[in-house]
Structure formats: structure tokens, C-alpha cells
Image: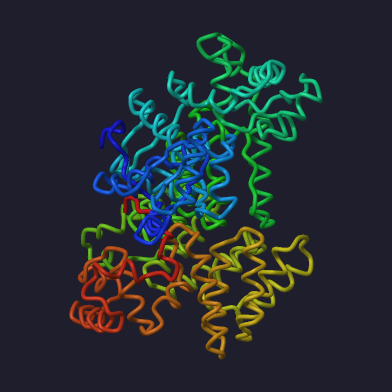
Amino acid sequence: MRNPRSPWPFTARAEELDLVRRNLSAGHRGIVVTGAAGSGRSRLTTEAVPEAMRESVLVVDDAHLLDDASAALVHELAIGGRTRLLVTVREGEPAPEGVSRLWEENLLPRLALAPLTERACAELLARAVDGYVDALTVRRLYRASRGDLRLLRELVVAVHAGGDLSHVSGTWTWRGTPPITARVRELVEETIRDLDTEERDALELIASGEPPGTGAGVPGALVAPAVLERLRARGLVTVDGRLVHPLHGPVLRAAAAEPSLAGGPSGGRRPPRASALAAECEELAARAYAGRLAEIPRGVGERMAEDDTGWDEPAMPEFCARRARVARLRGETREAMAWSREGLRRSPHHRACLAELAHAAAYVGDLTTAWQALSRGPAPAGEARTRPWQAAGARPPAHAGSPRSQAPTQDRRPWASAAVPARTWALAAEGDLDGALRSALGVAGDGLFGDDLFALHDVVRLGSPELVADRLGELADRTEGDLAPLLARHARALARRDGDALDKVARGLADLGLMLHAAEAAAHAALVHSDRHASQASRNRASALAGACQGARSSALVNLALPRLTARQRQIVSLAAAGLTNRQIAEQLTVSIRTVANHLCDAYARLGSSDRAGLEGLFTVGQRGGRTGGPR
């Protein structure tokens, strides 16, 4: 691992850097860069104006701190136009009139730096620690820093120094409470330094009653309504009186030298959490089934998982499994894998977590993880499918995991309810679409989960809507909410090859938060539209939606991404992109190695790729920007 105290790489600001450099080139007067504290203004300046350019460009960093006379001089230089200026100003701070007039009078263009996105934060962290950082760790650091790159860096330094940054199976992971070092406290205090005494006291009172992970009580209830309203207006507390910034509570409690109410060395009594956790599990299940996924509130379960507490709560692994399912349905495949692994870390044989891990891994083509997770639970009832390597008595290939004969066989049906859909998509990822369809139809036809909308919809996603369209329609007629009718419309529109209707379905699914399903519906629309412009518009929509799905590559997206290949070539390319050798592919498909090699050579020619190393970038319609890397 790189030393986190060493300079971090310049990341995710390429467009801004190009804009600044263009405005500092010959014939331009310069530019003003504004941004919140920690947004990277000074680093952007350093990258845009290296030492060799310092003689031709006047850099005025933190111009909001200038006195009036100095600000007036900068203003005069801008009017004269002979000196190229790069001026930075912190947003939210009053700037002298001579500085603010630079952009108000259009003397210089103004670039407002937006906070880094969570995806950009993941990329920055991966480069900073020289390795893949799991999704929960990225989310925790992103939330805690709230876009302040200085705070992000200090948190990573503190976590690493405290030995809490673990490296397991090629992934960096952080669990536990946030480290409140002197520098972290200084940066967090900076965000509340302008509070008056009354507001500060109120914020400390709220902090003392809001220990992370309890979910008990409403801290803001003890604060005067007028003061609470002022704190809300500043964006410091929520409508129900809770702290917005994840670090305000720990910092204020540390400053007040108050013991945490969550229990620990102080001997405080831990408030009961089991009932709140059980309620959240039920809420997540209800949201998943109803398709209400656009916004998931952050509650006690998520805080407990992130803070690495609640080991003695039996519902924690189940919560992680439910949270993984929600993430998977939203297209957040890497996050779903992280939640599944968090549950398995607490309960290594938790079946729902294993199934969710397999399901999400199959979506991103990680067949090693998918089959290994499935092999750790009993096979579905009546399932005795033999892989080619098993029939030959050979050693399993790298992607196959443990032989299924070694898996326990008791209590099959509860495992099957979660494992069969995962197995369906593992088969699809291998390119065995016939096997995947048989698996999906088996789920949809079993009385145990015959009413599962998503199981029936899997058949639609695999390209055979006519097999389940009527049944989905029946369910839509007797099911409340928007999800069932929308899935039924997807089946009917695809069966009729109605591109316009499929476009509407894609928009509806995206509105519900089902991003991968929406991307697939848009991909279906692109393939059935007869009008070239309409097809391209649907393709663009599918690409944008798939780009938010963290590297997912389902069969519908593969068909759109690789339209020039035959079905057999797509199957072989899928297996090659998943990391299988020609021999393993031949065993899998019961064909000769020469046949596999010939199909791959033909596919390379059609795709404009020279070898299998170039397949990954071509494989999914939304691959650009959709995957941040990670262990395979």
C-alpha cells in the first residue's frame, strides 16, 4: 500500500484542468475558480500552472482573504488585460468587491468546482492506496468527508495509522468508529465555527443524544424550536432533528468530553436495537418487493454495519442480505457484493448473503465468486446438473469453485428460494442462455415462489417474454403499486417488439430506481426499433443507465454491445471475458478447442480487437465509466 501521507494523485478533474489551461493560454485573460473548502482549488491551480508558467501567470490563491487595496489591484490588472490571472475563491466566504467584480463584470470567466461524486471518490481512493477499496468503505469515507478532500485524506491517514484499514483478498476495508484525530477535529470544527453560543449548545445537546447506531429517541426534541429551525436552515440538522454531518456527533462529543451513549469503556447502557433492526429488515424487504428503491433511508442497521457494531444481533447478517438485495436491484452490483460479504463476515454460512453475493458477482462476470458462493449452500431441490469437468472426473476449472457434491443437502428449499435466481444469472454469465432460461422458468413455475414478480421478470430479461406475459399480467391486476404493472408492460412490449412502449418502460423502471432493469428495457428498445434515430436514442439511454450499474453486464446488454456476433460467438466471448481458457470453454460447451479458437478469432475481427485482453472494454454497452475495478 502507498503511504497515505504521500501526495495523492490528481484525479477526476480532467475537464476542469483543460478548461483552466485553455483560459490561461495566449490570447486569454485568465479565469476565476471557486469552490467549497477542500474542493481542490489549490491542487487544480498547481496542476494547471507548473513552475515553468509562473512567470507568465499571476496566481492569486484564496483571493477572498485579500484586503480591499489588494483586491482593487487585482481588478485593475484584469481590466488592463496584459496579465493572465488565475484567481481562486472559497465559496460561502465574503469576497472583497474588487474580487467579486471579476466575474460579475465578465472580466474573467468563472469555474465553480462541484464536489467529487462518490464514483470519483472511489477512483481517487483506489489510486491513493494503490488497490481496490470496497464499496461500503468508499461510502463511509465519502459521507464522512462530505466532499472535503482535505478531510477525506486525513480520515484515510488516521484509519491507516490506527491499523483499522484491512487488506483481505485484494480489497481494502474499513469498519469501526471514525477516528477523531486533532486534524480531523480541526477540519470538522471549521464547518461550525460560525455558530453562535445558543446554536453551538443546541448542536452539542443533539450530539449527546444521538450515538451512532442506536436509532433511539429524537435528539432534537429537547432543543428550542427557534434554534432548531436556524440549525435546519444552515443544513446542520434534519427535519426530525438529527445531525446531518456524520462527524459532527463524534467531534462534538469528544470536545465536550462526554461518554458515548452507545456503551463501551464508559460502561454506558446500550439502548435496545433488535426491534429497530428487525423493523428495518422488514422495511427493506417491502421496498424491494414493491420496487420502491429510488431512495433508501439510512437507519440503525446501516450505521451498525458501517461502524462494525452489533455482532451479537442475530438480525445483522439478515439485514446485510436485505441491503445487498436492494443494492443489486438498484444496479449497484459492487455495493451488493460488499454488503453480502459484510454479512458473511459476521455469519460465514448465511444463505441469503451467499445467494446475493453469487447473484451480484454473476452480474459483473465474476464467475469464480458466483460459483464458489453457490457451492457453499445446498443445491436446489431436484437439481443434479453435472458440469462437463465433473462428468470427466477432472479437476474443476478456476471459475467453478468447490464441487457441488461437497455441499450439504439439508434444508434445500429455503436456500433454493434465494439461490436459484442467482444460479440463473451465473449460467447466463457463462453464456448458457438455454440453461439460464430453464432455471428461470423453474423458479417461476415453483409454487414456493411462483408469485415472485422478479422471478417471472427474469424470464423476460432473458428474452422470452411470451412465456410469462400472461402470468405477469394476472399478477399486475391483483398487486398494488407501480412495479407489477410496469413489469407486465415490459413483457407485453417486448413480445410485440414495440420499441416506443419499451422506451416508456425503461423510463418507468428508472424512476423506481431499478437501474439495471431500466438499462435492459432500453437495450431491448434499441434492438427492436425500426427507425435508426429512435434505435440510437434508446441505445444512448441504455448506455447511460448501464453506466450507473457498476460494471453489470446482463445478456440484454451483451446483445446490444456485441450486435455483430452470432449467438455462439457471444457465448464464447462471454466465457473468455470471464477469464476462462480455450480448453475450459471447450469443456463447458462440449466442443473442440479448435472450434473455440476459430470463433474467438472471428469475433476479434468483427469487434476490432486483437486478442482477449481487449474484450473487457468492449463487453458491455455501459462499460465506459461504469466500473471502477476490483478483485476478480
**Image check: 189 left or right of 24?**
right
Whether residue 362 is visible, yes or no, is no
Residue 276 horizontal/vertical position (percent)? 67, 32
Q: Nearer the viewer, residue 557 or 378?
A: 557
Direction left: furthest residue: 594
Looking at the rendered image, the quarter that the N terminus falls into is: top left
- The quarter holding residue 504 reads bottom right
In the image, is residue 269 above or below residue 368? above
Q: Which of 419 and 602 is in front in this view?
A: 602
**Image check: 258 left or right of 199?**
left
Residue 390 horizontal/vertical position (percent)? 28, 63
In the image, is residue 278 above or below residue 271? below
**Image check: 313 left or right of 584?**
right
Residue 577 horizontal/vertical position (percent)? 30, 67
- The quarter holding residue 204 reads top right
Residue name at image x 50 percent, y 10 percent: 265
Direction bottom: furthest residue: 530
Looking at the rendered image, the quarter that the C terminus falls into is: bottom left
Residue name at image x 53 percent, y 63 percent: 516
Whether residue 48 is visible, yes or no, is yes
In the image, is residue 625 above or below residue 156? below
- The quarter holding residue 15 reads bottom left
Residue name at image x 21 percent, y 76 percent: 610
**Image check: 600 left or right of 16?**
left
Residue name at image x 59 percent, y 27 percent: 213
